[in-house]
Each structure stands twice: as C-alpha cells, then as structure tokens.
Image (spheres, coloured by chain):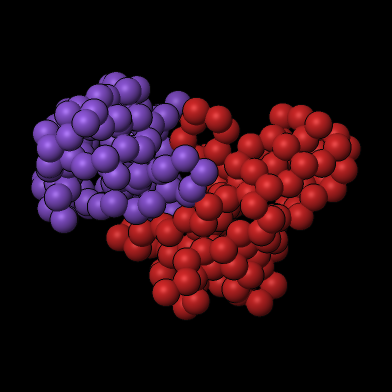
Chain colours: A red, B purple
Amino acid sequence: GAGVSQTPSNKVTEKGKYVELRCDPISGHTALYWYRQSLGQGPEFLIYFQGTGAADDSGLPNDRFFAVRPEGSVSTLKIQRTERGDSAVYLCASSLSGWAGSPLHFGNGTRLTVT
Amino acid sequence: GESVGLHLPTLSVQEGDNSIINCAYSNSASDYFIWYKQESGKGPQFIIDIRSNMDKRQGQRVTVLLNKTVKHLSLQIAATQPGDSAVYFCAEGSSIQGAQKLVFGQGTRLTINP
C-alpha cells in the first residue's frame, strides 16, 4: 500500500522566509512524528502527534518551529524566519498506535536548504 | 546525556558473507530497540525491532541480538547482497519516557564488495 508521503521533496528558501512542509501519513495510522536529519547524522526527534493533538513537542528547537495536524491525518511543519542552520532533511513518520512495538514508517523526507 | 552510539562508522564485507553491525546504548530505561536501513535519498526503512524482554529476534535474513547486561545491540545480516548496501541506524525508545521519541545513533555505512 501507499507509504508516508512528504511534499515538497526539495525546498530552497532564503534566510528569513517562512516555509511549510507537508506530510501524508499511512492511512489508519493514528500516530505521526516529525524528525530532522542533518548530514551524516541520525534523525532527531522534533514532535509527536497522537490523533490531532501534539502529545510531545519537546524536540522542537525553538518557537520558530510549529506543527499542526488539524484532522488527525495530514500534518504540516511550519518554520518561521528560517535560518541557515535550519537546513536539513525533515522526515515524517507514522505508526499504527504510537506505542513501543508499533514501528515508525518514514517518508523520504523534505530536503530544506536555507540560503 | 544519554545516547545511542555505534562502534564502527563503516563496514565493508564481501558479497555472500555475513555482516554484523554493532550498537551501544546507555539509557538503562530503554526497553524498545529498532534497526533501520537508509539508502541514499530515501527515508529510514524499518528492518526489525526487539523489546527488552527478549534477547534475540529473527527476521528474513536478519537477526537482532540484545544484551542488556552490557547495553549492546547488534544486527546480523546473513548472506549479504549488493542491495544491502546502505547506512544502518539503531534506535532506542523507552515506554516510560515516551517510546515514540526514538533516539538514533549516527549510523554505520555498510558496503558490499562483489
């Protein structure tokens, strides 16, 4: 079946601009996650949704980052006043339940480049 | 802080040989461990997971071993194929601290020689 879909696959923006990254999870998965992966590193947790609510946003680096999932399916990660240090691959994942033993299934990510 | 790490950043094996990728973790509260495979330009792909009440779990051509005494995790790939070339990540989670907040290691690049 269809996996996690992320759009756009690449995004180039200028420093100071606002960007939105979209994630379509696997149908039926209640849990959705955003991770960020810098070059040569493993993914780092940003935020986790169970249904429509952000159950854990402790990984968001600062208040320029915000994510929503208004209907419990599609999610948007929003970054305000982008900085060059925000350049990374932003990965979205979904899982059936959000509990241990329910593996995360990742999309191919959005590569964000801030110039 | 507590972290997951890998002993070897790169591993090169002959096609057909078995591969072993190692991982150390330090969070004693971790009770869920996962291995992911990541090919260039793609997201991490789930391979196999194991919970802390198990020492070993087998999948198709892969086996994960967990040694809680020394906080060590390994992934064994049998009869490696060219398609196994990728970066492999171990990740840990804690049911108490929020299993969904997986902590990933840096990764090991596996290269298969013909």
| B106 to the left or right of A33 | left
Q: Where is residue B92 in the image (x, y as percent from the top left)?
A: 34, 43
> Which quadrant holds residue A14?
top right
Total marks shown come to: 0
Location of residue B110 with respect to A17 vertically, above or below: above
> Which quadrant holds residue A84?
top right
For the C terminus of chain B, give its image quadrant.
top left
Residue A94 visible, this angle: yes
Residue ID at (85%, 48%): A18
Q: Where is residue A16 in the image (x, y as percent from the top left)?
A: 88, 37
Residue ID at (46%, 35%): A42
Residue ID at (18%, 40%): B80
Residue B95 visible, this angle: no
Q: Which residue is more in the foreground, A8 or A20?
A: A8
Location of residue B8 with respect to A61 vertically, above or below: above
Location of residue A96 with respect to A45 vertically, above or below: below
| A110 to the left or right of B67 | right
For the N terminus of chain B, give its image quadrant.
top left
> Which quadrant holds residue B67?
top left
Residue ID at (21%, 42%): B81
Q: Position of residue B59 (x, y in %)?
A: 16, 55
Q: Where is residue A88 in the image (x, y as percent from the top left)?
A: 64, 37
| B35 to the left or right of B100 | left
Q: Residue furthest front?
A: B114
